[in-house]
Amino acid sequence: MNPVSASQPSDEASTPSSPDAPRDRTLMRAVLALGVGGFAIGTGEFVIMGLLPEVARDIGVTIPQAGHVISAYALGVVIGAPVLAVLAAGWHRRALLIALIAVFALGNFATALAPGYLSLNLLRFATGLPHGTYFGVAALVAATLAPPGQRARAVGLVMLGLTGATLVGVPIAAWLGQLFGWRAAFVFVGVIAAIAIELLRRNIPDIPAASGASPMRELGALKRKQVWLTLGIGAIGFGGMFSVFSYIKPTLTEVAGLSVGAVPLVLALFGVGMVMGNVVGSRLADKSLMRTIGALLVWATLVLTTFSFAAHHAATAAINVFLIGTIVAIGPALQIRLMDVAGDAQTLAAALNHSAFNMANALGAWLGGVAISAGLGWTSTGWVGALLAVAGFGVFWWSLRAERRTANGATAERAAS
């Protein structure tokens, strides 16, 4: 049985005394526990970006060299998501989630003790390994517990932990890092992850893996064309946001004329946009999944194109950065799409969604840097981002056409028989 389409109780409105009430409480407790884990992971992933000068001074390297720890973490996510999802295919969901967040917690505590450049990079790589699998399995659990027609909404609530981290967790961790040294920020992240372990233990039902789950069956997802096309939509179409955001600070100060002190306020608007996009996007995805994905790629194209013009004025730049944050709305929709096209290999497909997003991060940042280095200016990242969104829409259109051909072929075979 498909774990995200298991039979659910009636859609009738729940009351405190209705049979649906216990299910709703179970879902909300589970979502809270999963969200706290996501909050810890999001904070740990992004806080380093604001502490690179402190890290560089402490371990005796340049700031660009210190930036390698960001790449090391992203590489851990890309590699860890498929490997761990396949190896742990038969694990019960609660045990797997606890193990993943425990590895993440230990990785952050160890990061705080790293003596030098090499050890720090190795530890950040190891800490990134459980990232994608955690969010993939968390999405499967939330979707399994959700009422009919609310899978994307439940996944979106879990992802609020990740998007909320950019708004709350990262500033707190960065403040601690400035006050007590960068290592304190990772101790803080480790503590949050440890709290998540207990919440997961208490609030996640003991859901077994799907019947017959195995590493070989999970690898079967890689034989499905629609899985690859959906991953391509995320890896390419989502890259535009990172093309702009990777260079947002110098763009705001050198083009929009903002002071360095005002930049965090604009970045907070980006975080608000991410939270709002996540909530709205998940609701739209529950109503019409494929239309939502297509519409959000068009939205990303418009918003990123506008950035090249809006960035020249402080007020319009701030508004546009907020709108760019809303592009994250495509995340829950692509997560549900992967679950739908993965068949009986859901764990791997769900985990690969986050590998795709990290590839989008790398692709967007690299192409944005190429444009800037070519002398096209800081605002050229908006055009790069828009082109990536258009390319992502092209992959989306390819996916639709392929799905329709498959459906028409199946219809013709039934008619012939």
Image (cartoon, rainbow, N blue to C red):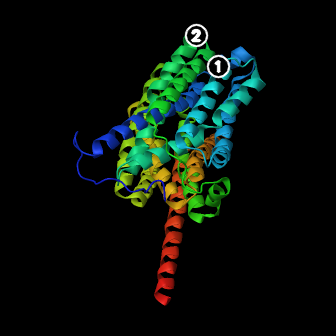
Position of residue 12 relative to residue 173, above or below, is below
- Residue 344: x percent and y percent? 56, 59
Instruction: Give the quarter of the image for residue 366.
Output: top right
Q: Nearer the viewer, residue 49 or 411?
A: 411
For residue 255, say whether it is visible: no
Asked whether, in this view, residue 149 is left or right of residue 253, the answer is left
Q: Residue furthest bottom?
A: 416
Upstream in the sequence, badge 2 or badge 1?
1
For the residue carrying disc 1, how many other residues have a C-alpha within 10 Å: few (<14), some (14-19), or many (20+)?
some
Which residue does the image show at 60% across and 34% down from the upper left?
A: 99
Amino acid type, label 1: Pro
Provide the residue designation for mark 1: 53
Provide the residue designation for mark 2: 180
Position of residue 7 relative to residue 366, above or below, is below
Amino acid type, label 2: Phe
For residue 415, say whether it is visible: yes
Q: Nearer the viewer, residue 219 or 318?
A: 219
